Structures are given as structure tokens and as C-alpha cells.
Amino acid sequence: MSARAASWLAWSLAGLSFAMFAANIALYILTRATPVPSDWGTGGVIGNLLIPAPFLAFPIVGALIASRHPHNAVGWICLADGLLSILSDMIGYYSVYGVAKPGSVPFPVAIDALGQWLWVPSVGLLGTYVFLLFPDGRPPSRRWRPLAWLSGAVITSVSIGVALAPGPLAGFGGMQNPFGLLQPWMTPAFWVVLPLLPLCMLASALSLVLRYRSSGGEERQQIKWIAFAASFVALMYLIAMISAFVFPSGAWFAAGSPLWLDILAYAAILSFLAIPIAVGFAILRYRLYDIDLIINRTLVYGALTATLALIYFGGITATQAILQTFTGQEDLPQLAIVASTLVIAALFNPLRRRIQDFIDQRFYRQKYDAARTLEEFGARLRDETDLEDLAGDLISVVRDTVRPEHASLWLRSQEQPTEKRP
């Protein structure tokens, strides 16, 4: 395929994704105007529109990569993943509307059954092939090709098992799958394969780790981008899941769930944007080497935010407990809240500097030592008058900070005339 044809195809698929998302909005509005039984599991605006919105990043990034690097499979995988996710949502809206309003659209139950298995290739492509083929679109070596074939076989088998399994359709109040052709004794054979899917994902992540250890230069920086994004998403989902299990009424976006939990859950879903953005930045090489700065700032300000929040809520809780003990007053006075806010503002810069030093010492030791060496050299430079000692110190500082294979210093003699330019 020529570069022009690849670019046309990539952007056409991205445009199709946006057209389907616009259709989702229209179908959602039509569904809201139609009486829908409560046991169909239709959610509100957050569950129906805001949650699928981050997946629009996948076709955009996929089109950017595929149009510039058509031989890199990662771009086409991002396109396919975005298409499958948005298509699955559109099928769901279409089917709910068709069943709730009989005769409005053809074959709503059959079309919903066709869309019940789309989550398998969507999750499988993203969790296996993106990590296995990143960043150049090829496995790290020929030894990893069996994993690619195994992942494809597992994704295909699980998709067939989900699509043809007899039983009720999810979210449709007991309506049966019209394509449930498998016999009862055949269904477990497909579900036995399902645990292989997360194992293939873990093996693909391991391939990326091994690729990072054997890589250098630009490729190592590219892998840092996606590793940082995956770690960030995992951390956000872990926080949201722990919050849902620890606190009462912890179901995400459920009736009666606290607003802060819904916001935290949506923040976890929104963090999923980090993966396509990181893939796009890494492969397109836009400001590629800023990833170390991003990781550093994330560690510093993440730890700073957590520390300040702990101090703030801990101070308010302690103040309230003291007031309740000695005065019997349960409501916290505004003065205590203002005082806690001022304390947080006063602690911001000192804490930030201390956390920055701690992060640099623990995770960026070479950079930290280089900065300290330059500071010490600058202090000596103000008092140094001997040129021989100064030259020796300069060579020593260069060796300690830059670590070149060889360092030399040339000094121009005073007798040599100075070049003058107009």
C-alpha cells in the first residue's frame, strides 16, 4: 500500500469512528425518550457518553501513526481498538432502542448478540499486540512469534465462545442469544481458554521489559513513554477499586453512590487516555526525551499532593475531634478550615523542595550527584586564582558529570592574536 493510500484509509477509519460516536449520541437521546425496563442496565450520561469518550483518542492516534508509518502495525491496532470499542457501544444503543420500541429498527436482538463478543478483540489487541509489537511494529525477536500466534488463537477462540454460547444476553432482561449454537458440553471448552488471555497479556508486557533492558538510545526512551502510561493507568484503577471496596455504597456510577467515588472512577477511566497519547508521542517522536522530566514531575507532585491532602484532612479531623471532646460542638468552625488552608499554603514550597531532593536522590542519583558537583565547582570557582588548578578542577568536573570517554582542555596562549569580526 502506498503512503497516500494508507493515509486515506487511516483517516477514513478515524472519521468512521467519530461518525459512530455521533450516532451513539443520537441513539442515546432516542433511548432516553423511550421507556426502558430497569433490568436492562442502561446507565446515565456518565455511563453512556462520558465513559466511551476517551476511546476516541485511539482512532486519532492510530490515524496519525498509520498515515506517517504505514508499515508499523501499532497504528493500525490502535485504529482497530478504537473502532471496536465505539462499534460495541453503538450496537448496544441500537439494540436497546429497537427492543424498547418494537418495529423501529430491524433485528435488534440479533445485532446485539453480534456485538456481545467485541470486547474480547478490543481488550486482547490492546493488552497483547500493542506491548508485543511496540515501538517498531515487530516482535523483539523471532522467539516471540509463537506468542503472537498464540494470542491470536486465544482471542479468536474466546470470541467464538462468547458469540455462540447459549444463554441470556447481558443487560436484556433474560432474552436468549439467537446465535447460541454451541452444545452445553462444548461451552466449557471455550471458557477454559479464557485464562490464557491474561497470561498472554503478561507475557507481552514481559517482552516489553526485556526489550527495554536490551535497548538503548531512542528506543529506550520510547518504551519509557508506554511504561509510564501503563503504570499511571494501573495506579488510578487500583485507587478507584480499593475505594469502591472499602467504602459503603461503593458501586461505580450506581444509584446512591457518593459523588466523589463517581468522580474518582471517571478519573480512572479518563486516565486510559494516557496509553494512546503515550504511544503517539513515542512513535511520532515529538519531544521524546522529555519523558524523564514528566516522570520526575509526576513523582514529585503526586507525592506532594498526597502529603498535603493527608495533612489537611488529618488536621481537620483532629481539630474536629478536639472540639467535640472539649466543647461538644460537632460542626467545624470556619476559622479552623481557613487556618488549615493557610498551613497547607505555607508548607507547599518547603515540602516540594524536600520531596524533589528525595526523588532525585533515590531515583535520579546520577543527575543529583552531577548537580551537587556543579554547585561545589561554582563555589570554588569564585575563589580560585590559579589557572593550573582551575583547569584540573574543570576536567575533573566534566568527567564526574558528563562521564565522557576522554576529556581534554586546550588553552589559547596570550601571544596568539584575537580574531576580530566585523
Image: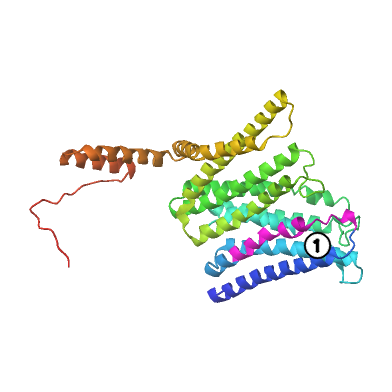
Q: In which quarter of the image is residue 125?
A: bottom right
Tell me which residue sits at (64%, 69%) in the image.
14
Q: Identify the coloring.
A: rainbow
Tell me which residue sits at (61%, 36%) in the image.
312
Quadrant of the drawing holding the C terminus: bottom left
Residue in front for this viewpoint, 335 or 292: 335
Q: Report if residue 101 is visible in the image.
A: yes
Q: Give percent across and percent down for residue 159.
A: 76, 57
Q: In this view, does 282 lie to the left or right of 18?
A: left
Q: Is residue 148 left or right of residue 87?
A: left
Q: In this view, does 164 lie to the left or right of 289?
A: right
Is residue 212 positioned above or below 242 on the image? Answer: below
Q: Report if residue 166 is visible in the image.
A: no
Q: Give percent across and percent down for residue 294.
A: 50, 49
Tell me which residue sits at (50%, 48%) in the image.
212
Identify which amino acid the numbered label 1 is placed on.
Gly
Report the number of discs. Answer: 1
Dominant SS in magenta: helix
The magenta stretch spans residue 49: yes
Residue in front for this viewpoint, 81 or 16: 16
Q: Name the residue under label 1.
A: 92
Q: Give percent across and percent down for residue 113.
A: 83, 61
User: Which residue, as the protein is rendered here, is positioned at the far top?
Assistant: 326
Magenta stretch in the rendered image: 37-62
The magenta stretch spans residue 57: yes
